[in-house]
Image (cartoon, grey):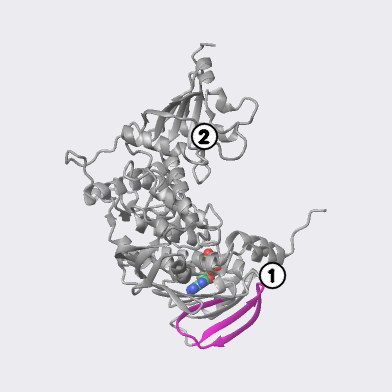
């Protein structure tokens, strides 16, 4: 095909694809426009997950009549004048392409009036083309209505998930901006039902309650920057960001990183390194594989951060990333130590050296003089092919790699001790075995519980005392939606006002030490679109419970406990993997050991 310049409609749709991925991205752009326009009250309404309708109503500056059509032109913005502005962006938008992109893939109605004008303007665009413009009465501010999103882009339409899932993404966006702008009253209505509302009172803590619920908010500690940028009136530290926000006490943790929320100059961003900085501050305080809940706000000179590196502006680049990283880590750690009074057994504030068991456990590779850490060994195990697996090279072979599919019982093992409070060392007829205590216990619990489920021993177990669940609105919505099914599956849950529920009974398989956390995990699975209640999903439910209830890595075991774990594992029908498919046991065969020590 000859090279051709694309017709504007095609180019427009391609460009739109970068900005508008799903209804939530439309909501994000509209919300940012309202915030940039200085609105103090923003109402968002969606129908059918945003596919049928998205409407954002604000009381911001409005758009003057003569400029209104220009708002939809590509690269038309009121927020930048010249190149130098690009180096210090203080608004959320700046590219002038959001409205153009949204209009290219939907039907848009704009109703807007600046406070000082008497009459508003109504504009209608179909597929990016202005089809109607007229004077129209309206309150001061702007109302943007998007209908039939992606109707002219079937490829995109196909990728939209269920309305509930898309609505969940919208909810997440709204909740995050409510945190970043506690002074702005924000609400979300989904299919006519109010799903979220922030007070706009200006207090971050109130916004925190609106987003996460009181129960979580009460377990958060205030984060304040440790080094003030205006140290004694000097300019020292002028380029160190100010860090504020809230971070959870160590016992508040979640199964994923989604609950570490970062803002830079009130822009919600995604940054792996900064999430890691937050997690690092909790070093050794959280169980392995769990993540903290935190809301961290960075304020810094806009010249120190480039927000123009990603189409959706979700990623940014810091001029001095290292300083930002350590400021965040220090502020969060400070909150944990000072406010959370985390102390060592000697009463002194806890210091944070890396304990030996926290360093990545390493195994000395036999004969090679090289180190393989446990994670890498797993990787090798997974990727290893039959002919001389890299794992074998290092004297490691996963016990089940040569075995055909199907459960294969273990030989009788004798436990010898524990390595790094994570692995149990055992001896058997064919050499040495290293058992992952958490994975192994998960397997043991899984088979026990599945056995009970199959026999339908007891379906539901009444709790000694009813338990109140104060949920964040997102999970409360999920629970409300599935209330009947949950109750059918053995729960006894009833609404308890607002986003709270009273739980009187749980399915008997859920009777684990931390019932509340297990229930939250289940709701979280549902939020992510998994359905632990679907037919045949009992297994999924059980495996989620086992993950929660099993012995953790980092837990010291007595000799009896180790031996008991080994016995129980021997009795399992499929002892070699955990319910999630990871190996529970590695085998170092006698031959390998002999070869490695040069005995043969
Ligand atoms: P950008 O936000 O990058 O400038 P947009 O395409 O999102 O680009 O918006 C284009 C312009 O339309 C903005 O610069 C602003 O002047 C105007 N605008 C859009 N939404 C609003 C609103 N809700 N209130 C006032 N002005 C708005
Ligand atoms: Mg914009």
Instruction: State the residue at coordinates (60%, 27%).
Output: 389
Please name the predominant secondary structure of the magenta segment in the image.
Answer: strand
Residue 64 percent location from the top left of the image:
51, 78
Write down the quadrant of residue 128 in the picture: bottom right
Q: Is residue 598 above or below residue 430?
A: above
- In depth, the one of 499 and 309 nearer the eye is 499
In this rendering, does residue 47 appear at all?
A: yes
Q: Nearer the viewer, mark 1 or mark 2?
A: 2
Give the structural element (helix, strand or loop) at label 1. Answer: loop
Q: CA distance from mark 1 to mark 2?
A: 47 Å
Q: Which residues are magenta?
A: 119-145
Instruction: State the residue at coordinates (33%, 44%).
Output: 281
Residue 495 percent location from the top left of the image:
37, 73
Q: Is residue 560 above or below residue 101?
A: above
Residue matched to label 2:
378
Residue 371 percent location from the top left of the image:
47, 24
Q: How many marks?
A: 2
Give the structural element (helix, strand or loop) at label 2. Answer: helix
Is 133 within the magenta?
yes
In the visual, does 376 lie left or right of 240? right
Q: For label 1, count other residues whose C-alpha is less than 10 Å away and answer few (under 14), some (14-19) or many (20+).
A: some
Residue 580 shows which numbered tag?
none
- In depth, the one of 20 and 476 nearer the eye is 476
Residue matched to label 1:
152
Q: For label 2, count other residues whose C-alpha is less than 10 Å away and answer few (under 14), some (14-19) or many (20+).
A: some
Residue 292 percent location from the top left of the image:
36, 51
Instruction: State the residue at coordinates (34%, 37%).
Output: 561
Point out the residue furthest to the right here: 1
Q: Quick check: is the Cβ at mark 1 less than 8 Å away from ligand 1? A: no
Is 364 within the magenta?
no
């Amino acid at each position: 095909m000859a090279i051709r310049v694309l017709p504007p409609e095609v180019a427009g749709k391609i460009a739109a694809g970068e900005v508008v991925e799903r209804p939530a991205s439309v909501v994000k752009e509209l919300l940012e426009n309202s915030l940039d326009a200085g609105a103090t009250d923003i109402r968002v309404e969606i129908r059918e997950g945003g596919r049928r309708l998205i409407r954002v109503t604000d009381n911001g500056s409005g758009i003057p009549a003569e400029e209104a059509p220009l708002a939809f032109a590509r690269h038309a913005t009121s927020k930048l004048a010249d190149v130098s502005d690009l180096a210090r962006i203080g608004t959320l938008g700046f590219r002038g392409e959001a409205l153009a992109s949204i209009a290219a893939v939907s039907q848009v109605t704009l109703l807007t009036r600046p406070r000082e004008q008497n009459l508003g303007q109504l504009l209608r665009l179909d597929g990016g083309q202005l089809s109607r413009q007229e004077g129209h009465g309206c309150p001061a501010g702007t109302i943007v209505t998007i209908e039939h999103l992606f109707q002219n882009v079937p490829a995109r339409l196909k990728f939209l998930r269920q309305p509930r899932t898309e609505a969940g993404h919208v909810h997440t966006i709204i909740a995050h901006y409510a945190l970043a702008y506690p002074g702005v009253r924000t609400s979300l209505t989904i299919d006519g039902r109010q799903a979220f509302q922030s007070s706009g009172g200006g207090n971050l803590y109130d916004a925190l309650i609106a987003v996460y619920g009181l129960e979580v908010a009460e377990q958060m500690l205030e984060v304040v920057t440790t080094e003030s940028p205006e140290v004694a009136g000097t300019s020292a530290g002028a380029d160190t960001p100010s860090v504020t926000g809230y971070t959870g006490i160590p016992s508040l943790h979640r199964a994923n990183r989604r609950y570490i929320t970062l803002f830079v100059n009130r822009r919600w961003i995604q940054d792996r390194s900064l999430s890691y900085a937050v997690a690092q501050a909790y070093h050794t305080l959280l169980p392995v594989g769990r993540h903290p809940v935190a809301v961290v706000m960075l304020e810094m000179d806009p010249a120190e951060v480039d927000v123009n590196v990603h189409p959706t502006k979700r990623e940014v680049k810091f001029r001095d990333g290292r300083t930002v990283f350590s400021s965040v880590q220090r502020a969060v750690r400070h909150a944990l130590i000072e406010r959370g009074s985390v102390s060592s057994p000697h009463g002194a504030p806890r210091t944070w050296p890396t304990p030996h068991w926290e360093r990545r456990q390493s195994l000395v590779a036999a004969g090679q003089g090289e180190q393989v850490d446990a994670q890498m060994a797993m990787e090798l195990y997974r990727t290893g092919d039959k002919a001389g697996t890299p794992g074998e090279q290092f004297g490691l072979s996963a016990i089940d790699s040569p075995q055909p599919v199907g459960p294969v019982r273990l030989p009788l093992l004798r436990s010898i001790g524990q390595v790094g409070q994570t692995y149990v060392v055992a001896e058997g007829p064919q050499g040495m075995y290293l058992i992952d205590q958490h994975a192994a216990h998960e397997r043991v619990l899984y088979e026990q519980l599945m056995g009970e489920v199959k026999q339908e021993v007891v379906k539901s177990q009444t709790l000694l005392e009813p338990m109140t669940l104060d949920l964040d609105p997102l999970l409360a919505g999920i629970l409300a939606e599935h209330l009947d099914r949950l109750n059918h599956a053995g729960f006894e849950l009833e609404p308890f006002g607002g986003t709270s529920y009273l739980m009187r009974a749980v399915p008997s398989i859920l009777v684990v030490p931390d019932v509340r956390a297990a229930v939250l995990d289940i709701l979280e699975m549902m939020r992510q679109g998994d359905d632990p209640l679907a037919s045949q999903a009992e297994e999924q439910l059980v495996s989620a419970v086992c993950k929660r209830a099993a012995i953790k890595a980092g837990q010291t075991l007595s000799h009896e406990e180790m031996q008991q774990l080994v016995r129980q594992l021997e009795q399992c029908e499929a002892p070699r993997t955990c319910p999630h498919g990871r190996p529970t046991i590695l085998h170092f065969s006698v031959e390998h050991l002999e070869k490695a020590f040069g005995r043969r």
